[in-house]
Amino acid sequence: MSIQSLTVNQFRNLDYANINFAPSLNLIVGDNGSGKSSLLESVFFLGHGKSFRTNKIENLIQSEKDHFVVSAKDDQNHQLGVQRGKQGEIQIRINGDSKFRLSDLAKHVAVQVITPETFRLFFGGPKERRKFVDLGLFHVEHSFVGVWREFKKVLLQRNACLRQRIVGQQLDYYNQLFCQQSEIIAKVRSDYIERLANELNKWLAIIMPDLADNIALQYQRGWSKSRQLHELLAEHNEREIKYGYSLFGAHKFDVQFSFNRQPVEQVLSRGQQKLFLMALTIAQANLIFESQQIAPIILIDDIGAELDQHSRAVLAKAIGKLTCQLFITAIEKNALEAMLPEQQNYKMFHVKHGVVTEITQGEKHE
Ligand SMILES: Nc1ncnc2c1ncn2[C@@H]1O[C@H](COP(=O)(O)OP(=O)(O)OP(=O)(O)O)[C@@H](O)[C@H]1O
Ligand SMILES: [Mg+2]
């Protein structure tokens, strides 16, 4: 989907904003502290029911207010909205009906985000990479949601057994389920990663043509590929009890990226790493689009950070080929100049002290 109009109320420093967006490219400029990231965060919240910057809802609610509202009308005239209060109250509305859960909202809106912080985290450890891959799986492989939900329940129960040192039949029971489900998930993920790798090659050829041939993906399923999971659980039983959680299994998967067999984060420059992550995000967005026929949304916060003029231009070329709605922020308007597509079907906005205004045609080129 693409967001046709967005209304944001009492969200961080955005007191009230009602914005009509372009279906493809939206460029947002403003000084430090003006509200650019907050605007992206509100869109992200619609798709995820959480922020990419904080786990605390009260940080998102405007100071001295007790709730915020974010709502949007999509290109098919669906009305989606979420309201969150200080005490954790939540209300989801889809087309005026409020019987929905956050996961229903997530089905409608596939939002991916790249910020300087998520970029750092992506190459800093498996957590962000897991989130990234599972978001794609959630939207592309519809069977995944149910299997993953079941697995998470079993994981919680198994961890509780380990923590409480409950062994014997009960642990055996969970172990069996845990191993079966881990195998199923590992297979679904591995198939998906293969598709992602193929798609990535296409986009790397556009975005990083000089490096594309030497980049590879390695999927790690969460336990050694030469071992059976149930054997590992038996071998490491004491250790798992000591830690009180499951050390192996489908939740421990990872994807590593290498350039000439070296980890990308150790050999590519920061700008190259960022371009690589953009290519990966675009590849995943395209898979989501192909499987759902619903255009996903990509948020890129602070495009100027790490990317030079040429890099932004190649990125713009790739973006031009994508069926996707994009929201890109920068502090300076000239950081976005290289992104401007030939056609004029993009919109540009200026944010100042939490007030968002559209920049008109003439002003865009000033
Ligand atoms: N809960 C809140 N209530 C009111 N204002 C808030 C709240 N949380 C953050 N702010 C303020 O909102 C403003 C906008 O922050 P935001 O991170 O969106 O700015 P930005 O435009 O992305 O800036 P930068 O270019 O530095 O990244 C900041 O001044 C921040 O202090
Ligand atoms: Mg910001």
Image: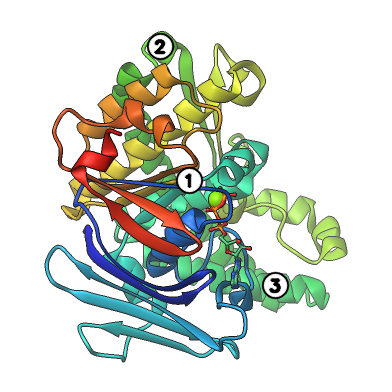
Q: For mark 2, what is the residue? A: 213
Ligand 1 placement by image quarter: bottom right
Circle nearer the viewer, 1 or 3: 1
Amino acid type for the residue under numbered disc 3: Leu
Q: Is residue 298 left or right of residue 288?
A: right
Residue 112 in sight: yes
Q: Nearer the viewer, residue 182 or 42?
A: 42
Image: 349 above or below 106 = above
At x 51% / y 66%, what residue is drawn?
Answer: 151
Colour mapping used in the image: rainbow
At x 52% / y 52%, what residue is drawn?
Answer: 131
Q: Is mark 1 within 8 Å of ligand 2?
A: yes
Circle nearer the viewer, 1 or 2: 1
Q: Quadrant of the C terminus?
A: top left
Q: For mark 3, what is the residue? A: 171
The disc label shown at residue 17, or none? none
Q: Point out the residue furthest to the top here.
A: 210
Q: Quadrant of the N terminus?
A: bottom left
Q: Is residue 240 left or right of residue 170?
A: right
Image: 205 above or below 121 = above
Question: Sequence order check: which comes first, mark 2 or mark 3?
Answer: 3
Q: x and y percent of residue 275 in the render?
A: 46, 27
Instruction: Tell me the distance, in whole angstroms, between the alpha carbons under discs 2 and 3.
Output: 46 Å
The disc label shown at residue 301, or none? 1
Q: Is residue 77 left or right of residue 287?
A: left
Image: 96 above or below 273 = below
